[in-house]
């Protein structure tokens, strides 16, 4: 038996009437922004953000959104570090298996295998310590920024903060808008300075092997998914758009567009 259609107005304090808020189940799947930062004092931090996306690809730019922390009653450590240092690293969160080092004394470490997705989930805990160390996640040095990368991640972006936009909770404290769980939200936009790609994830024809990497993505509730299948479609273009449209749709390598531009200026 089907349920009746639903319409509700969140800013009027209305709810869906369902057992759980369904809003985050609709803009899906959402890539995970597994962001590493370093504080001014030198402490590293690692945390996942399910509001993450690229902004543009020319030049490459990404964003993630940090809600206020209910425990610390301020912006999350990641956002605070970005405000103070203007740097962060995005690490691809995957379903894959990684290496974890457990400290068993000053000279001895035990190496074991673990699911990288579980490490992503563990770092969602807003602690006062270095999540790399707390959850046994191995670091790799970055080249252009101070924060380290996640060594087992197949792709990492070294980023410099471009801007931070606050989405203020204008209705906070007003009964008309209902309860507010996260207060203000900060959109952190970063320019990608450098990109790391593990060679094991590059196919023979020079593509990123997304099926091997199996990136995970957030759905609603406690649900996640990962990429285990792909299909292709070609974006249509007008005849006078030239090779630029073919490059954007993936039909031609970028070098062909550069050659076309060189011919025009010759």
Image (tube, rainbow, N blue to C red):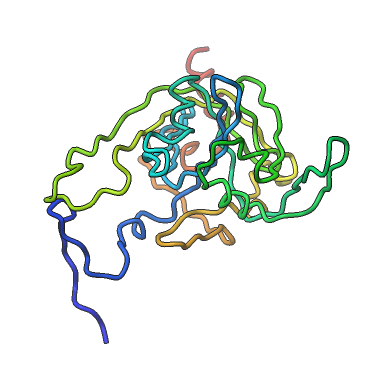
Please report the residue visible at 56 percent of the width from the left and 57 percent of the height from the top.
Answer: 227
Please report the residue visible at 61 percent of the width from the left and 54 percent of the height from the top.
Answer: 117
Please report the residue visible at 68 percent of the width from the left and 41 percent of the height from the top.
Answer: 206
Residue 88 horizontal/vertical position (percent)? 53, 28
Q: Quadrant of the N terminus?
A: bottom left
> How many badges with numbers are in the image?
0
Residue lying furthest right? 107
Q: Which quarter of the figure has residue 182? A: top left
- Reply above or below: 97 against 87: below
Residue 30 horizontal/vertical position (percent)? 44, 51
Residue 201 is left or right of residue 6, and the answer is right
Is residue 202 something one can see in this rendering? no
Q: Nearer the viewer, residue 3 or 126?
A: 126
Residue lying furthest top? 266
Residue 116 horizontal/vertical position (percent)? 65, 51
Q: Nearer the viewer, residue 29 or 145?
A: 145
Q: Which quarter of the figure has residue 200? A: top right
Residue lying furthest bottom? 1
Is residue 37 something one can see in this rendering? yes
Please report the residue visible at 57 percent of the width from the left and 46 percent of the height from the top.
Answer: 123
Residue 140 is left or right of residue 184, and the answer is right
Residue 86 horizontal/vertical position (percent)? 48, 20
Residue 160 is left or right of residue 178, and the answer is right
Residue 64 is left or right of residue 168, and the answer is right
- Reply above or below: 95 against 75: below
């Amino acid at each position: 038996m089907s349920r009746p259609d639903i319409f509700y107005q969140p800013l009027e304090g209305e709810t869906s009437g369902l057992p759980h808020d369904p809003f985050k189940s609709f803009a899906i799947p959402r890539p995970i922004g597994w962001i590493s930062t370093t504080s001014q004092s030198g402490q590293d931090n690692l945390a996942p953000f399910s509001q993450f996306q690229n902004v543009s690809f020319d030049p490459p730019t990404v964003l993630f959104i940090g809600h206020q922390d209910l425990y610390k009653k301020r912006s999350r450590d990641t956002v605070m570090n970005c405000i103070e240092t203007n740097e962060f690293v995005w690490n691809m969160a995957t379903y894959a298996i990684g290496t974890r080092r457990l400290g068993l004394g000053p000279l001895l470490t035990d190496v074991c295998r673990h699911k990288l997705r579980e490490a992503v989930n563990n770092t969602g805990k807003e602690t006062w310590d270095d999540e790399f160390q707390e959850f046994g996640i191995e670091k790799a040095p970055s080249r252009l920024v101070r924060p380290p990368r996640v060594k087992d991640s197949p792709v990492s972006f070294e980023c410099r903060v471009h801007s931070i936009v606050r989405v203020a909770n204008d209705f906070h404290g007003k009964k008309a808008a209902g309860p507010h769980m996260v207060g203000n939200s900060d959109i952190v936009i970063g320019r990608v300075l450098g990109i790391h790609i593990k060679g094991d994830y590059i196919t023979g024809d020079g593509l990123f092997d997304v099926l091997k990497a199996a990136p995970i993505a957030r759905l609603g509730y406690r649900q996640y998914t990962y990429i285990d299948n792909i299909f292709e479609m070609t974006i249509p273009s007008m005849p006078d758009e030239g090779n630029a449209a073919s490059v954007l749709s993936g039909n031609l390598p970028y070098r062909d567009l550069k050659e076309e531009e060189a011919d025009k200026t010759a």
